[in-house]
Image (tube, rainbow, N blue to C red):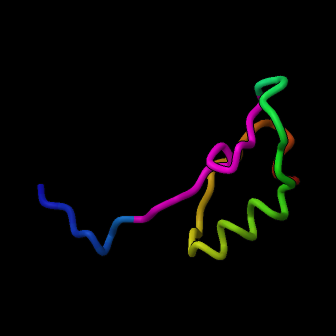
């Protein structure tokens, strides 16, 4: 079954910005920065990232 490229969607993930639940992983960027960067790139969807990263 052929896929229409126009129907594909790209999402981001906080891990792409170094946000991880692993202790000692390193500097964690704040949620506002990560989401602003995602918006600037035109991403309209994301994974949640580690528990508590995105506000509820």
Magenta span has 20? yes
**Which residue ends up furthest to the top in the rendered image?**
23
For the record, the magenta segment spans 9-21
Closest to the observer: 8 or 39? 39
Residue 13: give x, y in percent of width and height.
62, 50
Residue drawn 32% across the image and 70% down it: 7
4 with respect to 12 (left or right):
left
53 with respect to 19 (left or right):
right
Number of marks in picture? 0
Residue 49: give x, y in percent of width and height.
71, 43
Residue drawn 62% across the image and 56% down it: 46
Q: In terms of secondary structure, what is the magenta stretch mainly? A: loop
54 with respect to 49 (left or right):
right
Q: Answer above or below: position of 15 versus 32.
A: above
25 with respect to 2 (left or right):
right
Residue drawn 75% across the image and 70% down it: 36
Q: Answer above or below: position of 33 versus 51.
A: below
Closest to the observer: 1 or 21? 21
Q: Which image quarter: residue 30?
A: bottom right
Residue drawn 74% across the image and 64% down it: 35
Residue 2: give x, y in percent of width and height.
13, 60
Magenta span has 33? no
Closest to the observer: 25 or 45? 25
Residue 10: give x, y in percent of width and height.
46, 62
**Which residue ends up furthest to the front in the rendered image?**
26
Image quarter in which the N terminus is found? bottom left
């Amino acid at each position: 079954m052929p896929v229409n490229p126009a129907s594909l969607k790209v999402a981001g993930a906080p891990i792409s910005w170094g946000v991880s639940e692993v202790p000692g992983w390193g500097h964690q960027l704040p949620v506002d920065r990560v989401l602003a960067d995602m918006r600037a790139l035109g991403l309209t969807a994301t994974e949640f990232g580690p528990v508590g990263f995105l506000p509820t």
